[in-house]
Image (cartoon, coloured by chain):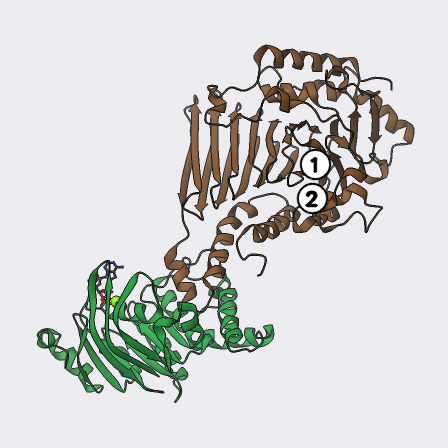
Amino acid sequence: MLRIEDLHASVAETPILKGVQLSIGPGEVHAIMGPNGSGKSTLSKVLAGDESYTVESGRVDFEGQNLFEMPPEERARAGLFLGFQYPVEIPGVNNSYFLKAALNAARAARGEPEIDPVSFLKRVRERAQWVGLDDSLLKRPVNAGFSGGEKKRNEIFHLAVLEPRLAILDETDSGLDIDALRAVADGVNRMRDPQRSFLLITHYQRLLSYIEPDYVHVMVRGQIVRSGGKELAAELERSGYAAFEDEEAA
Amino acid sequence: MAGAPQWVLQRRAHAEEQVESRGLPQPHWEAWRGCDLGALTPSRLTSVAAPALASSVAPAAARGAGAVTDPSSDPLRGPIGLLPAPLCDAASARLLFVDGRLTSPVEASEWPPGVTVSVLSGVGAADAHDTTATTAAVTTAAAPEGSAAVASDQAASLWQGDGWAASHLGAHAKADELPLAALNLARTREVVVIHVAAGIEVAEPLLIGSYCSAAAAGQAVYPRVLLCAEPGSRIGVIEWCSGAAASDYLHIPVYELAIDRGARVEWTRLSEEGEVGRQFATLRATVQADGELALHSHLDGGAQVRADLGVVLAGSNAGADLSGLVLGKDASYLDHHTAIWHCAAETYSRQLFKGVLDESACGLFDGASHVAEQAQRIQAEQQCRNLLLSDTAQARMVPRLEIYADDVRCSHGATSGELDEQAIFYMRARGIDAAVARLLLTEAFAEGAIAAGPCAVAAAYQRQQLRRFLPGGEAL
Ligand SMILES: Nc1ncnc2c1ncn2[C@@H]1O[C@H](COP(=O)(O)OP(=O)(O)OP(=O)(O)O)[C@@H](O)[C@H]1O
Ligand SMILES: [Mg+2]
C-alpha cells in the first residue's frame, strides 16, 4: 500500500526528516509515537503533499505510484487521506458541499459519475452518526468556529464519507473528551477493512487500546528508531522516550 | 409642453457657470488626491452628439452572461436587450439609455401603482455643443387608478417651478460643491425623475440602465436620475452602467435620492464598464427622520471607475447601510469614495466594502464619516477588506473620521491580504482542485459583501458575474 524509503525532508532549510523507512501493507494499522518536534506531523504533511516542506531525497510508493509525482489533490483522489493535527477553518464553504465536491473529484478521477444527491445525503447522515457529529455542523462552513473536539470529529467524519485507501490520522485523539475519543475510535474501527490501511500518529496509549494497531513505531529526531507490536506502546507509556533518545535508525 | 421648464434652464446655466468658474477637479483638491484625472479634459467632456439608434447598437458588445438576449432574435426587445436579462426579467419596469438617450418611451402601464416616472428629454438647449436640441418632451406614467388626465396633470405639476422636481434637482448633488455634478447638470440631455407616493411599497425593483456604445468613444455621457421617496414609501432601484468593450467613453452619471420620513430606498449600482470605458459617478442621498437607505455598489471592470457616494442623515434615527464589491483585473482602477454626514441624533451608518483584485488592478476605498455636534448617540461603522489575487494588484484604504459629538459609537477596519494557503492545502488534501479551492475561497470572501446588498436579484447576478470574473469560474 505505502512504502517509504530513506525519506529526507526539510522545512525552511532545516532538515526535519532524516531517513524515514516505513512500509504499510493493505489492511494494516500502524501507529507512530514520538516526542514533540520529532517530525511526525512533518512526515504526514510530506505524504499529503504540503509544498511548504521540501523533499530532499528518498522515495514514496503509494499503490504502485510515485507519490512525489502527484499533486496533493491527485494523492487524495487516489485514496490518501490526512486527518490534520490542526484542522483548518474554511470560511464560507459549507461542510457538506465541501465533502460532495471532494467526493465527486475522486469519482471523476476514477471515471465514475457524480454521486446522486439522495445517496450522498444518506451517506452523510449515516457517517455523521457513526462519529457522533452534530447534524448542525454539516451546514456550517468547514471547521469555522468548531470547537477543538468538533474539528477532530469532523476529520473522522470526512474520513468516513470519503472512504480512502490509506488514512493518516495526526493526533486525532488529542484534545478529545472520553466520549469523543470513543466515538472517533468507533468511527475508525467501522472503517477498518482488509483493503484499507491506517497510520495513527498519537501520544497516547489510550487510543491504541480502542484501535488496536498491528505495528507501533517510535520516531525520534526525524527517524524511526524502533518498531514493534502493540506492546511497544505500553512500554513507551511506562518508560517514556528517554530510552530511545540515543537510538539511531536500525 | 413646449421647451424645458424655465427653472431647469436656469439651473443648467448656473451649473455651466460653475463649470467655467471653478473648472474641473484638480489633483491637489483633497477629494481628488491621487486620482488620475487625465480623462477629464475639456475635449473628452463633449456630450455625445449623434443620436443613438437601436440599429447602431451592436448587441454583441454587451458583456456579461446576463446580457444574452440578442435583440435580433427578439425584435420586440430592441436595444432593451442590452440590459442583463436576469435583471430585466425581475424588474417591475425598465428604462434604458444608450449614449444618453432614452431608447423607448416610458409606458404608463409598465410602472407600478403610486410610482410616477418622467423623463425630461432634449434639455440640451444650454449645451453649447448640442445643435440639435429638441423641444423638451415629458413622458409620464402614473398610478393606474389615476385617469390619463390625472397622469398628465401630474406630469405638468411635477415640472412646475414649485413642484417636487424643482425642489430636489440639484439640491442634493450641488453644482456649487461638486464640479462633476455641475458638469452633469450643465450637459445632461435627459433627466429622469422618479416619484414614489407616500406609503407606497414597491416589491420588485426598477431597472435603469445606461449604456455607452462605440458611438460614444472619446466623448462623455451624462445620465441624471432624481428619486423622491415620499414618507413611508419603499422602493428598490437597480442602476446599471455599462458600455461597448473597445469604446473609450466617459460615463458621468449623477443620482440624487431624496428619502423622506420613514421611507426606505434600496439602491443597487451595478457598474460593468467596458475595458477602456471610464466612469465618474456621483450619488447623493438625503435621508429624513426614520428613513433608510440601503446602498450597494458593484464595480466590475472599466479602465477607471470612481463612485462618489454621499449620504446626509438629516433626521433622527435615519440610517444608511452601504456595501459594495469591487472586482478588478487588468489595470483597472476602481474607486469608492464614501461620505456619511451624521447631522442628527441617533442616526446610524454601516459600511462594508470588499475588493477582489487581480493582475495589476488597483482598488481604492476612501470612507469618510462626519459627525456633527448635535448628532449624539449615533453609530458609524465602516469596514473595508481586500483580497489580492496577484502580486501586482494593489489596495488602498483611507478611513476618515471627523467627529464633533461626544457620545458616539464609531469603528473602522481595513485589511488586505491574500488567500489562505493553509486553507488551500487543506482543500487539496481532500481532493479538491487547487483552482477550485481558490475559487471557492474567493467566492466565500466576496459573499459577505454580496449578501450585504439589499436586492436578491442583483445579488444572484453578482454571484454569476463573479464566476465569470474568476479564473476557471466559468468552467465550474
Ligand atoms: N513550517 C515550519 N516552519 C518551521 N519549522 C517547522 C515547520 N514545520 C515544522 N517545523 C519544525 O519541524 C520540527 C518537527 O515538527 P513536527 O510538527 O513534524 O513535529 P511533531 O513530531 O509532529 O510534534 P508534535 O508531537 O508536537 O505534534 C519542529 O522542530 C518544528 O518546529
Ligand atoms: Mg505533530
Taking depth in this image into account, of A55 and A195 the one nearest to the observer is A55
Q: Residue B353 location, x and y as percent?
A: 50, 40
Q: Residue B304 location, x and y as percent?
A: 55, 34
Quadrant for ligand 1 reads bottom left
Among the chains pictured, the one given green colouring is: A
Q: Are marks 1 and 2 in contact (CB under 8 Å)?
A: yes
| Residue B268 quadrant | top right
| Residue B421 quadrant | bottom left
Q: Residue B60 location, x and y as percent?
A: 71, 47
Q: Earlier in the sequence, mark 1 or mark 2?
A: 2
Among the chains pictured, the one given brown colouring is: B
Q: Residues within 10 Å of mark 1 (few under 14, many from 20)?
A: many
Q: Residue at horizontal 46%, vertical 35%?
A: B381
Q: Residue at horizontal 58%, vertical 76%?
A: A113
Q: Is residue B216 left or right of residue A120?
A: right
Q: Residue B201 location, x and y as percent?
A: 72, 39
Name the chain letter of the residue that bears numbered label 2: B
Q: Is residue B255 left or right of residue B431?
A: right
Residue kind at label 1, given as amino acid type? Ala
Badge 2 is on which residue?
Answer: B61
Name the chain letter of the residue that bears numbered label 1: B
Indicate the quadrant containing the N terminus of chain B: top left, top right, bottom left or bottom right. top right
Residue kind at label 2, given as amino acid type? Ala
Q: Residues within 10 Å of mark 2 (few under 14, many from 20)?
A: some
Q: Is residue A54 left or right of residue B387?
A: left
| Residue B24 quadrant | top right
User: Considering only vertical position in the picture, is A141 above or below A153?
Assistant: above
Q: Residue at horizontal 9%, vertical 77%?
A: A243
What label does residue B214 carry, if any? 1
**Residue B168 appears anywhere in the view:** no
